[in-house]
Amino acid sequence: MSIRIAIELHFLAAVWGGSFLFTRISSPELGPILLVVLRCGIAALVLMPIIIKQKLVSQLASNWRKLTLMAAFNTAIPFVLFAYAMLTLSAGIGSVLNATAPFFAALVSYFWLKEKTSKFGVLGLILGFAGVFVLMQDNLVIGEANLTLPTLAALGATTCYAIAANYTKVYMHNVKPLVLATGSQIYSALMLLPICIFFLPSEMPSSDAIWSTIVLAVACTGIAYIIFFRILSEAGPTKAISVTYLIPVFGILWGYLFLEEAITLNVLLGSGFILLGVSLTTGLIGKPRARASN
């Protein structure tokens, strides 16, 4: 891995880790649905000039049915679920729960695509879900807020990511990754726009919420996707996906620095279990998952 790719990888993790910070700031004032509509709509405006420059508009239009279904599970539903979860969960906890996506991807692959899971993969699943349990031990109830439902919402979001990843693998492997990213933003915004009319905030959001939404959309979504796909094309999927292991580090750090979120022993232990589990499940440690023979 070149120095430039390594720097970009850490920068991407820092930006995506920051997305939980900005969601935590914006969601309570804008509401989950309006926030996602603005995030996806603005991100689409950032990505569209590249789509036009690379002459990929026809691919974006011709695959609209598949892109709409993929967008629902890859962006619209999980973004709303995470925005809802971040009404009460801390930014650090949200970023760690986001790292459980590979666990659910392995489970969906097993039941849908009949892909076998190695012993290391099974161990990774066990460690990962044990990590979620440890992580939430001192966070299930804070004051009068019960965090069980927000936690389940975050896990539901990562399950949606897993379904979308496997759907893309089966039905959209010939579509350019940048088209997938842009289409996901466009069609998510369009499908949520009629719904958000019924969930508009009762008063004007603060400047902090507005600027957090803009940064979330432009930097954490639009620009972040551009960087990710550049790393993907130059360094390959294995190195690109390693950003998953770095995001929680920055998510916890930003939450601690800017929102004064506590870093407890359970947060550190739970995060460690989850990241170790992800490493085993994805094959970074031990043997990778094997495909079932046809």
Image: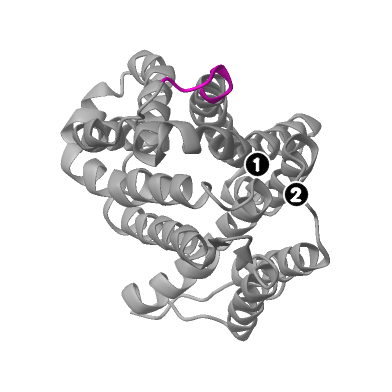
Q: In which quarter of the image is residue 40?
A: top left
Q: Could you tell which of marks 1 and 2 lies nearer the N-terminus?
A: 1
- The residue stretch that appears in magenta: 204-209
Label ID, residue 249: 2
Above/below status of 202 relative to 167: above
Residue type pointed to by label 2:
Val
Q: Mark 1 points at which residue?
A: 17
Q: Which residue is drawn at 57% across and 61% down?
A: 144
Q: Quadrant of residue 165?
A: bottom left
Q: Quadrant of the N terminus?
A: top right
Side of 245 relative to 188 (left or right): right
Q: Do the residues labelled 1 and 2 touch (CB within 8 Å)?
A: yes
Marks 1 and 2, how far apart at CA: 8 Å
Q: Does the magenta stretch include residue 199?
A: no
Neighbourhood count class around disc 2 (C-alpha, 10 Å): few under 14, some 14–19, many 20 upward: some
Q: How crowded is mark 1: few (under 14 residues within 10 Å), some or many (20 or more)?
A: many
Residue 145 vertical position relative to residue 35 in the rendered view, above or below: below
